[in-house]
Image: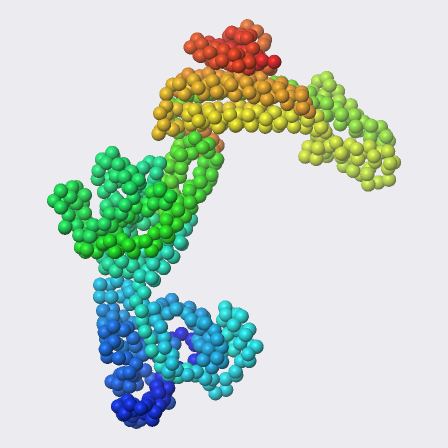
Amino acid sequence: MSQLYKKDTPFQVFISFKKYLDVLEHIRYNDRLEYRANYAESLIEKTKNFSEFREGFQEVSFLEKNEDLIKLLLADLFPTGLTNNEIKAASVPVSNITFNYTDRFKAILKDAGKDFEIEMRDIDDDEFYVFCCCLILQSYFKKDIKSTIPFYYDIPNAQGIMKHYKITVNADFTEIYPAEGTKIPSDEILDILLENLDDFKLWRKYFPPESWILKGFTIISLVDCTTEIALSDLKSTMIEVDTENFSQDKNLIEIFKSYFDIAELNFGLMLYNKKEQRLEKMPVYENIFTNHILNFWINAIDENTRKSTIINLHYNPKPIVISNLNHLDEEAKAKPSFSILKENNINSFMVIPIVKDNELLAIMEFTSPIPNSFNGLKLKKMESFSNMIIFSLSRFSFEKNYQIEAIIQREYTTIHDSVVWKFRNEAEKYFNASLGNKIYSLKEISFKNLTPLFGFSDIRSSSEKRYNLMLEDLNQQIDGLHEIFNLTHSDSEKFLLALDIFENELNNEIKADTEQRFQRLVREEIHSYLQAKLEVKSSSEVKAKIKDYFAQVFSQTDLFYTNRKSLDDSITLVNRKLADVLDEAQIQAQQIFPHYYERFKSDGVEHNLYTGQNIAPDLHYHSKIVNKLRYWQLKTICNMEIEFRNFKKDLPVCLDIASLIFVYNEKIDIRFRMDEKRFDVDGAYNSYYEIIKKRLDKAHVKDSDDRITCPGKITIVYFGMENQREYLDYINKLQKKGVLQNDIEFLKVEDLQGITGLLALRVSLAQ
């Protein structure tokens, strides 16, 4: 027998049968059936020597001492004919103390074990206190409120399966009234309380502990709702997917045992990787899920059989239910899978594909050593939460992809779509290891045996233009300062002398640090002098000149920047336009064959392409792909030149671009450098390719002072006659389309440091 309920309540609880005895008194004097009146009188007589039955008592031992009398007294409420069907008992109000059980209730408690103590499930102290207060409002104040907390008992059966019972309470034989000295809250206070159900302190203020009397007994009836509770728990478990803090739910198997009413049950689940057509474990559940059947499909059969089995399930996702393994025919028993199942003590199982929008998401297995555990009816029960499984797996997949993308962004930075699959594979290994609380070191990402394509559209003479515009800016600034100091000659002679020295250096014998020294002079001395002139009494002409001067100063450097800004704006516009043309053309190029692509903006735009079988292992790669990409590259470079010609006249500073393509036949390897978060060529042999690229920019025609690149022309640099024939064919196609002129030049490139034998074609764009 449990002790009095330990939770704090506003009640002093007294066990009493007064209200039921009053019912018997009514029958005794008013019932027309004599035997009923005699029966009621007999019961009253048997209890008249026990004043506690009417006045009430709190000693729980009194129930045990008078167990037989109480059973006799309550016989009408507990019919003998229903004792093996109903789960019913009398109860001390708002407590866990029960007595006078039906035989079915006794059997349930006996199966639970002698050490089992019946307790209500998941009751929050504060919420229960408010619930008790609401009972007072309903019973004493006659408030029409629907305040019911669902109460449950969790009781294991003889097989150890946790059964869940919902409790319904009949409180007809209870009464509630205030204890002596209790202050009764007004209707206004009650309305305020009902508007603030979560303000537990407020409720305790107006309904202090033990300030009310609850006298009588209740009758509780239990309804087995194990399936409904287990289903609710399953849904809660599936909703609470958190990939950032994923933990094992060790109760999941117990929930399934309750839901299917199977004492010995194992569960497995594997996700389906559509791209690789294979099943994958969930690392976080490695120690909980069994996956005997699914493991066999992955490991115990050859690759072709495995794929065909999974593909068949993908396109024909019908569940497999074997009720009793021993009832299979001899042909089935001869298969390897039968021995695997028997070795793992599996005698009954279900395999259930999970499908959404005709796409296989995962496969579940339920196994049991107990024959006949699973059947069509158990499979039917899966329908109740199949949508929740689909939702949970879809959400898990979404969260997983989100986390993998975060890993890629954090560890590798933004990666081009064509190679992101390899980063995803590595990030997924990292992610799966983290789910299983394992340490995993990210591996280097590399691609081998690739064909490179390189090209650039360089802004011609940008350094020279920038130098000349720098001189213009500084001379204009010196001229502006001269005008100011000539107006304030009396105290600015030293500045005029310094300006003359700098002006002479800028226009005759400029030094490496001339600009820096001039900047230091204006920042540390001249500008503070001019600011002071603005603050003291100076002529309006001087102040106007100073304000006009500062309006032209670039605040970050304290120097004039107007001309250089025009150049920078022009270069930015050119880079943006050229990059847009290149990026848009890339969409078509990726359709030829996936390849790694990167571009860089500086004084112009350069790009690298790397293509090969390793970039897209699942696709067929052949030599014609390189030819198509090379033609695409030449055509795109021409389009970039044409686009530049169209907007060149609108640039703040007149610019020209010169474009070049470098053809390289040798295969190279690229490796992702974690320190720089970018790909680079891998190995000393491959670095030869990078060296050539860097030296072509300023290369000249052999035995000439002319650069190999020229504005308005496309230059193609290569090594052998085979490449020459290939590109002459491409040029001929573009000439027929009116893109290029018929003025092909055949050039030799000057010997560069360590590089000889380079040839070049140069051809003009059509006007």
Relative depth, front residue between 514 and 594: 594
- Where residue 288 sits: x, y (%)? 29, 52
Quadrant position of the N terminus in the picture: bottom left
- The x, y position of residue 375, in whole percent, is 22, 54
Instruction: Count the marks.
Output: 0
**Quadrant location of the C terminus in the rendered image:** top right
Q: Please say whether residue 50 is visible from this viewpoint.
A: no
Position of 426 with respect to 753 (left or right) is left
Q: Is residue 514 above or below residue 146?
A: above
Relative to 248, residue 549 above or below: above
Tell me if residue 200 comes above or below residue 572 in the rendering.
below
* Residue 99 at x, y percent in the picture: 29, 79
In this picture the colour scheme is rainbow
Residue 111 in sight in this render: yes
Q: Quadrant of residue 628?
A: top left
Residue shown at 25% from the left, 69% from the top: 112
Most extreme residue toward the left is 330
Pinpoint residue 495: horizontal percent, then vertical percent: 79, 29
User: Residue at coordinates 34% horizontally, 54% vertically from top-left?
Assistant: 385
Residue farthest toward the right in the current orientation of the protein: 539
Looking at this view, name the residue that lies furthest to the top.
703
Q: Residue at x 75, y 20 (%)?
A: 504
Q: Residue at x 41, y 70 (%)?
A: 149
Foreground of the two, 132 or 166: 166
Q: Residue extending furthest front?
A: 32
In the foreground, 626 or 521: 626
